[in-house]
């Protein structure tokens, strides 16, 4: 998620469109396309972001996790930055030192922390289970937002969090899919905490470019720098043998760069502009199902009865949280628009009170609140 400089001091929040954004916000609507086109975009989003867990697992088969993260985001970030440069975003509003600093913080938390730990976890934890645990990210965002920023927790969100905890307990229980590697399990549990922290920092503290394209590219590039440092610290460069690189890992890495990052970004931003937010947010509970099915079909990951029960519980919990927060966001937007209309009416009334004795009001420009 990225917070950019808005007009009149208002923050514009963009969810970082990488594999699983956290709290998307509606963008300005453009001409509404056909229902078929919107569903095509949604299905693309489901398949692209749901399949990235599988692609990560295949990529790290012969590429060390953080080296893979560095390569992915250096290339994807460079392509998006070039795209932004070509559209004139960089020249019109060159990024400031503060924006680069905040881009590094957000990129380090979301991509080096969140995505990096997903890659670490998938060395030992099945992709389906990883996706289900990561899917509870909205719950962590809600809890962290309450703890650090006193954000309101509506009752339905609390119910969703409790249900999600039950689902996690069932999922990681000994009868679900056999014993899970403690290190991998710890990584996949910490990942959404870091992702949630980065999302909240972006929403409440960060100053980033107004263009979501430029903001995303900067975060990717900064994440690439951080991933290189971590890869050096873990000894991945010395352990990596280019001769052992498989064609499957190369193709998976290319898929993550082009499809997971570029195509996913384009589909997500387009949907935010043309589709109802309630439809766009369905990715939060469809993506883990896609990852779960792909892991079973392509990688042959075992699925037990208790794993299916846990998956149903977690998906239901995420649906509760996302729908509740979506209704809350829509209510807040209605209140904001009502306040804007009230401000405009007040301004017009004030102009009337400044009328000259002859009855003609002073020329007053009423500027709508942005």
Image (cartoon, rainbow, N blue to C red):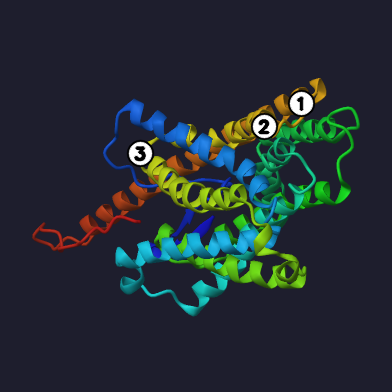
The answer to whether mark 3 and mark 1 are in CB contact below 8 A is no
C-alpha separation, residue under disc 3 versus residue under disc 1:
37 Å
Instruction: Say above or below: 211 vs 283.
Output: below
C-alpha separation, residue under disc 1 versus residue under disc 2:
9 Å
Pointer 3 local density, CA inside 10 Å: few below 14, some 14–19, many at least 20: many
Residue 145: image location, x then y, percent: 67, 52
Q: Is residue 132 left or right of residue 14?
A: right
User: Which of marks 2 and 3 precedes in the sequence?
Assistant: 3
Residue behind mark 1:
303
Q: Marks 3 and 1: which is nearer the front?
A: 1
Viewer-proximal residue among 56 and 220:
56
User: Which residue is at 64% across, 65% downward?
Assistant: 108
User: Which residue is at 70% across, 64% downward?
Assistant: 241
Helix, strand or loop status at disc 3: helix
Residue behind mark 3:
274
Picture disc at residue 292: 2
Where, quadrant-wise, is the N terminus in this rendering? bottom right
Viewer-proximal residue among 360 and 264:
264
User: Which of marks 1 and 3 precedes in the sequence?
Assistant: 3
Residue 353: image location, x then y, percent: 24, 58
Pointer 2 local density, CA inside 10 Å: few below 14, some 14–19, many at least 20: many
The answer to whether mark 1 and mark 2 are in CB contact below 8 A is yes
C-alpha separation, residue under disc 3 versus residue under disc 2:
29 Å
Residue 111: image location, x then y, percent: 62, 58
Residue farthest to the top, as pictured: 305
């Amino acid at each position: 998620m990225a917070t950019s400089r808005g007009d009149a001091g208002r923050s514009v929040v963009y969810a970082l469109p990488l594999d699983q954004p956290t709290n998307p916000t509606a963008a300005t609507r453009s001409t509404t396309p056909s229902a078929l086109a919107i569903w095509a975009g949604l299905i693309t989003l489901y398949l692209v972001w749901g399949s990235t867990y599988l692609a990560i697992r295949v990529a790290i088969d012969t590429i060390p996790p953080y080296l893979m993260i560095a390569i992915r985001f250096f290339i994807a970030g460079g392509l998006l930055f070039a795209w932004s440069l070509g559209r004139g975003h960089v020249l019109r509003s060159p990024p400031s030192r503060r924006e680069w600093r905040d881009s590094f913080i957000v990129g380090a938390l979301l991509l080096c922390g969140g995505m990096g730990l997903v890659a670490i976890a998938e060395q030992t934890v099945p992709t389906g289970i990883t996706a289900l645990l990561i899917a509870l990210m909205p719950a962590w965002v809600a809890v962290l937002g309450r703890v650090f920023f006193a954000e309101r927790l509506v009752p339905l969100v609390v119910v969703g969090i409790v249900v999600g905890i039950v689902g996690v307990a069932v999922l990681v229980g000994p009868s679900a899919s056999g014993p899970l590697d403690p290190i991998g399990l710890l990584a996949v549990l910490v990942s959404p905490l870091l992702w949630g922290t980065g999302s909240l920092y972006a929403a409440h503290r960060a100053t980033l470019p107004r263009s979501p394209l430029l903001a995303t590219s900067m975060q990717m590039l900064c994440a690439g720098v951080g991933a290189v440092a971590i890869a050096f610290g873990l000894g991945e460069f010395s352990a990596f043998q280019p001769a052992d690189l498989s064609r499957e890992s190369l193709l998976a890495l290319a898929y993550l760069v082009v499809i997971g990052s570029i195509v996913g970004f384009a589909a997500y931003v387009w949907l935010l502009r043309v589709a109802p937010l309630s439809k766009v947010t369905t990715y939060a509970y469809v993506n883990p199902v896609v990852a779960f099915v792909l892991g079973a079909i392509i990688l042959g990951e075992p699925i037990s009865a208790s794993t299916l029960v846990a998956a149903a519980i977690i998906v239901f919990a995420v649906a509760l949280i996302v729908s509740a927060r979506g209704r809350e966001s829509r209510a807040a937007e209605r209140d904001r628009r009502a306040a804007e209309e009230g401000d405009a009416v007040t301004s017009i009334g004030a102009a009337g009170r400044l009328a000259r004795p002859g009855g003609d009001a002073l020329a007053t420009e009423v500027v709508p609140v942005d």
